[in-house]
């Protein structure tokens, strides 16, 4: 839908939020900063949307700006609850009673891949709570009786942690891969008591703007980039609606961020089967071939740097293993004619359906990624994993269950300049 001129001040408001984030946090990319800006605005208008995306601030190491980002968010989002290792019982009740914006720090200590099974109830609440109207059930003991209690689960939520989180959470999230600041990246010293007065004003303006546009946002059907489908559409639709309502440059910036972040997510840690399909497409494009013998295809797959095909449980990929892994995608070898005679091999047409269904679309000639050691052609693949990959490493050491006395450690601020600091409000104390 088209928003009227009254939406134009929304662009200025988002510009202010964007600037505040950049003053105190060093983001890994401009796309990440745009996404977090829109996520903050969507938190004020969550009642307009059918779903609310989780914001996942992840890093391979401590001191990468995750906690600092949550501290800034706590100043700008409605009804913030900034908590570490909150109990399930407390979270169920606070979500039902207060409808907070959840800011969950050190999420790897209770939702990380190695401990997630111990906290299934908490993960279930966070998963269910992204969809409006979702409820969760708990049995409560009253004397000798046990009764089932229904709790509303819908709540805006941001999580920060080291390593990865379960896919069921990440599939509902905008992933921001935080990094330690490089020497040339500068941010200002963050002092909440100095920033609070002007942050109060900015947060109140966000709330007023969201309330004014609530009906328009409820009726919004934003155009989605081609790469935004299925679960990703649930994640990005609220943020793109916010951008369209704000106007200015925000619709274009939001769609660029959505496209780049979604493609980066697809490139990060694919399944072994998806990686095999992708690497086969690289080989065929590099050779400009319509068919390859099984031996030639395996030889080139094994030669790809950083690919796993040279060492699968101590042995390189062989013809039988290749056929077994491709069979589940309905790709099978056949007897085909080659210069040396009829041999077992694969044709590009055997892969077309699987490539179309499971891989990103091939880029235009001008956008084709450079393939080392090969030729750049119209048949080459879209930007590679290395070009789009966010440096998310898995399973680093766990943080303490409680915040460090020094707060955020990795994004130490440079001396503040003469600009007037922006203020923020204290979050509600964690339960």
Image: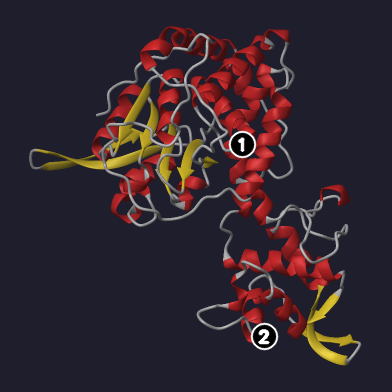
Residue 258 lies in quadrant? top right
Side (left or right) of 124 relative to 291: left
Residue 201 percent across, percent down from the top left: 48, 7
Q: Nearer the viewer, residue 119 or 309?
A: 309
Q: Which sits earlier in the primary sequence, circle 1 or circle 2?
A: 1
The residues tagged by marks 1 and 2 sit, at their Cα atoms, a distance apart of 41 Å
Side (left or right) of 157 relative to 51: left
**Which residue is disc 2 drawn over?**
319
Side (left or right) of 399 relative to 285: left
**Which residue is disc 1 drawn over?**
29
Which residue is at 70% across, 33% downward?
255
The residue at the far bottom in this view is 341
Q: Residues within 10 Å of mark 1 (few under 14, many from 20)?
A: some
Which corner quadrant holds the C terminus?
top left
Which corner quadrant holds the N terminus?
top right
Task: Look at the picture and state if 191 lies above or below 304.
Answer: above
The residue at the far left in this view is 143
Examine the rendering and report whether any part of residue 95 can be seen. no
Of helix, strand and loop, which one carries label 2?
Answer: helix
Side (left or right) of 75 relative to 260: left
Residue 338 percent across, percent down from the top left: 89, 86
**1 vs 2, front mark:** 1
């Amino acid at each position: 839908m088209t928003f009227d001129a009254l939406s134009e001040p929304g662009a200025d408001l988002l510009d202010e939020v964007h600037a505040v984030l950049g003053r105190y946090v060093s983001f890994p990319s401009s796309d990440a900063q745009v996404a977090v800006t829109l996520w903050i605005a969507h938190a004020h208008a969550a009642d307009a949307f059918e779903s609310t995306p989780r914001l996942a601030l992840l890093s391979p190491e401590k001191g990468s700006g995750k906690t600092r980002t949550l501290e800034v968010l706590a100043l700008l989002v409605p009804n913030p609850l900034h908590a570490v290792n909150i109990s399930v019982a407390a979270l169920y009740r606070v979500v039902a009673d207060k409808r907070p914006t959840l800011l969950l720090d050190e999420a790897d200590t209770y939702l990380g891949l190695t401990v997630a099974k111990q906290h299934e109830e908490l993960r279930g609440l966070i998963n269910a709570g992204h969809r409006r109207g979702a409820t969760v059930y708990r049995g409560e003991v009253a004397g000798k009786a046990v009764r089932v209690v229904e709790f509303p689960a819908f709540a805006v939520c941001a999580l920060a942690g080291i390593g990865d989180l379960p896919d069921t959470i990440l599939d509902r999230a905008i992933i921001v891969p935080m990094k330690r600041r490089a020497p040339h990246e500068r941010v200002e010293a963050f002092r909440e008591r100095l920033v609070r007065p002007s942050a109060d004003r900015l947060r109140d303006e966000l709330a007023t703007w969201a309330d004014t546009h609530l009906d328009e946002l409820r009726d919004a059907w934003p155009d989605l980039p081609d790469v935004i489908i299925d679960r990703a559409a649930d994640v990005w639709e609220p943020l793109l609606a916010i951008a369209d309502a704000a106007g200015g440059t925000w619709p274009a910036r939001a769609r660029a961020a959505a496209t780049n972040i979604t493609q980066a997510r697809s490139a990060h840690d694919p399944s072994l089967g998806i990686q095999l399909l992708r690497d086969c497409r690289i080989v065929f494009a590099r050779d400009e071939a319509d068919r390859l013998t099984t031996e030639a295809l395996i030889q080139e797959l094994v030669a790809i740097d950083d690919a796993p095909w040279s060492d699968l449980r101590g042995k390189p990929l062989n013809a039988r293993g290749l056929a077994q892994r491709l069979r589940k995608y309905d790709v099978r070898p056949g007897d085909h004619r080659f210069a040396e005679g009829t041999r077992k091999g694969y044709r590009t047409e055997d892969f077309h359906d699987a490539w179309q269904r499971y891989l990103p679309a091939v880029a235009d000639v001008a956008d084709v990624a450079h393939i080392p050691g090969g030729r750049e052609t119209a048949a080459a693949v879209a930007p590679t994993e290395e070009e789009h990959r966010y440096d998310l490493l898995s399973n680093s050491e766990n943080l303490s269950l409680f915040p460090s006395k020094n707060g955020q450690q990795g994004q130490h601020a440079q001396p503040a300049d003469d600009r007037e600091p922006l203020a923020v409000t204290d979050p509600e104390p964690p339960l």
